[in-house]
């Protein structure tokens, strides 16, 4: 067996395939678009990345989230604190006040009239105020999120689990939307 037949030389060049060229062109286009602030609409959002400006990040980190009643309010408050970077930060200069409301609506029905699917609507009205005396309004907004779950036949624990998972998804969505909208409003105020 000859040595030349069993090994390949590093100096040999493989032809670049058409798929690889397209991938390289897409990467170059992505880098070009990223430089101008373009972000894909359906790309996963990182709420901390929405505030790329250090001044906005410092405002978000100095924001205290006021208490929100009930268990779902506690979950929303914790999600907002995580996204704002509030844990262990210095003395707050702003306060974020949020009211949370849920609505449930049956969607599908069996022949006996019982629901087979429930749609939840979560609405969070929020207000950012300064901690000065008297408090001054900095920003405000209303965010809504929708989700639904199926109610299986005679599986009560599965229905409870599906409802709890739906509420958790709604809370995560509301927290992302509040921080994103807050960042946008703070950026607009900075530019004005």
Image (tube, rainbow, N blue to C red):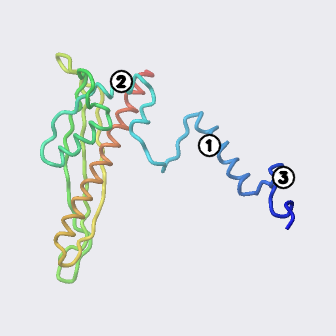
Is 192 on the left-hand or right-hand side of 126? right
Q: Position of residue 121 (x, y in %)?
A: 25, 55
**Placement of the C terminus among the 4 image quadrants:** top left
Vertical placement of residue 160 versus 14, above or below: below
Q: Residue at x 21, y 78 (%)?
A: 153
Neighbours of disc 3 within 10 Å: few (<14), some (14-19), many (20+): few
**Placement of the N terminus among the 4 image quadrants:** bottom right
Q: Position of residue 107 (x, y in %)?
A: 26, 69
The residue identified by callout 3 is: 12
Q: Residue at x 78, y 54 (%)?
A: 16
Q: Position of residue 5 (x, y in %)?
A: 85, 64
Q: Earlier in the sequence, mark 1 or mark 3?
A: 3
- Determine the CA span between mark 2 and mark 1: 29 Å
Is 36 on the left-hand or right-hand side of 97? right
- Which of the two marks, 1 or 3, is nearer to us in this view? 3
**What element does badge 3 sit on?**
loop
The answer to whether mark 3 and mark 2 are in CB contact below 8 A is: no
Vertical placement of residue 74 versus 187, above or below: below
Q: Residue furthest bottom?
A: 111
Taking depth in this image into account, of 116 and 80 the one nearest to the observer is: 80
**What element does badge 2 sit on?**
helix
Vertical placement of residue 108 versus 83, above or below: below
The residue identified by callout 2 is: 58
The residue identified by callout 1 is: 30
- Determine the CA span between mark 1 and mark 3: 31 Å
**What element does badge 1 sit on?**
helix
Q: Earlier in the sequence, mark 2 or mark 1?
A: 1
Q: Earlier in the sequence, mark 3 or mark 2?
A: 3
Dividing the picture into quadrants, the one containing residue 17 is bottom right
């Amino acid at each position: 067996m000859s040595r030349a037949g069993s090994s390949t030389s590093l100096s040999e060049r493989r032809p670049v395939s058409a798929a690889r060229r397209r991938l390289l062109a897409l990467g170059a286009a992505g880098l070009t678009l990223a430089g101008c602030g373009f972000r894909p609409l359906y790309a996963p959002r990182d709420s901390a990345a929405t505030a790329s400006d250090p001044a906005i990040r410092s405002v978000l980190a100095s924001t205290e989230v006021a208490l929100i009643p009930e268990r779902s309010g506690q979950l929303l408050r914790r999600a907002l604190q995580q996204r704002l970077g509030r844990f262990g930060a210095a003395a707050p200069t702003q306060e974020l006040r949020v009211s949370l409301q849920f609505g449930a609506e049956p969607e599908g029905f069996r022949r006996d009239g019982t629901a087979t699917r429930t749609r939840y609507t979560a609405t969070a009205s929020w207000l950012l105020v300064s901690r000065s005396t008297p408090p001054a309004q900095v920003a405000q907004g209303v965010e809504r999120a929708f989700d639904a779950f199926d109610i299986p036949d005679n599986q009560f624990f599965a229905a409870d689990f599906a409802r709890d998972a739906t509420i958790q998804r709604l809370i995560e969505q509301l927290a992302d939307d509040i921080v994103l909208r807050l960042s946008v409003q703070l950026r607009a105020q900075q530019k004005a």
